[in-house]
Image (spheres, helix red, strand yellow):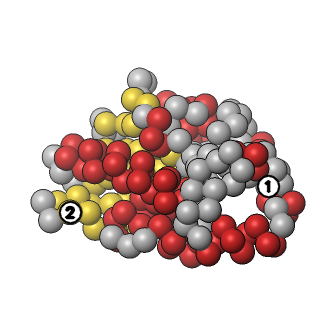
Amino acid sequence: MTLYVVRHGRTEANASGLLLGRADPELDEVGRAQAARIAAALPPGARVVSSPLARCRQTAEALAAHPETDDRLLEMDYGDFDLTPVAEVSDEVWAVWRSDPDFRPPNGESHRELGERVGAVLDELCADAASGDVIVVTHVSPIKASLAWALGVGIEVSWRCFVAQASITRIGVTDRGPSLHTFNQTDHL
């Protein structure tokens, strides 16, 4: 069976190039259309588990009337950088952030911490995904952590991949563990 890991549709903050962590904007018009296209591309009747933030819940509600939520699927906590334009983060900070998985933005969380919480929820969902499809609706950083989990590699891989809005990643689940089938698929859009 398959574990589908979906990035939420677009928000105005995404369109504006802001770091969007725990802030909670809703989907914009484009994001709502993307959610509908995701729903058309995924199998009906699957278990749907979502980050509790509005942009993910709204995307998940296009897939199921009453999706479950799990706080471990929240976006990375960017702390004081939340809603900061990406271009305003200094080159020095980016260099440290990219080279140290334990770096935390002020009042935020590290990539390593993110990877641990996302890995824990995926381990739990894996049991269900072995017998039926499970759809996880989450954010860019947890999807990158999902990629690292599926491949069995360090969270450092996060900086070497791109996750598009409303993309779908497919992870096959067997008794031998996870196997990455597709990453960042957008042909449904």
Side of 155 where 121 appears, left or right: left
Please provide percent x and percent y for residue 162. Answer: 59, 68
Q: Is residue 83 visible?
A: yes
Percent across and percent down for residue 151 are 35, 71
Q: Residue furthest right?
A: 88
Can I make out residue 34 in this image?
A: no
* Residue plotted at (23% across, 58% down): 173
| Figure quadrant of the N terminus | bottom left
At 59% from the left and 70% from the top, the residue drawn is: 100
**Residue extending furthest toward the left:** 175
Closer-to-camera residue (131/87): 87
**Residue type at the position of mark 1:** Gly
Q: What's the residue at 57%, 56% (across, down)?
A: 110
Q: Residues within 10 Å of mark 1 (few under 14, many from 20)?
A: few
For marks 1 and 2 on the same chain, the one whose residue lies earlier in the sequence: 1
Distance of label 1 from label 2 (alpha carbons): 36 Å
Q: Which residue is mark 1?
A: 17
Q: Secondary structure at mark 2?
A: strand
What is the number of the mark on residue 4? none
Residue type beneath disc 2: Gly
Callout count? 2
In the image, residue 66 sits, relative to residue 85, either above or below, namely above
Q: If the image is split into quadrants, where does the C terminus sit?
A: bottom right
Left or right: 83 in relation to 78: right
In percent of width and height, residue 34 lies at 60, 46
- Give the camera-side residue of 96 and 87: 96
Look at 66% across and 67% down and name the residue there.
97
- Mark 2 lies on residue: 177
Specify whether 134 is left or right of 141. Answer: left
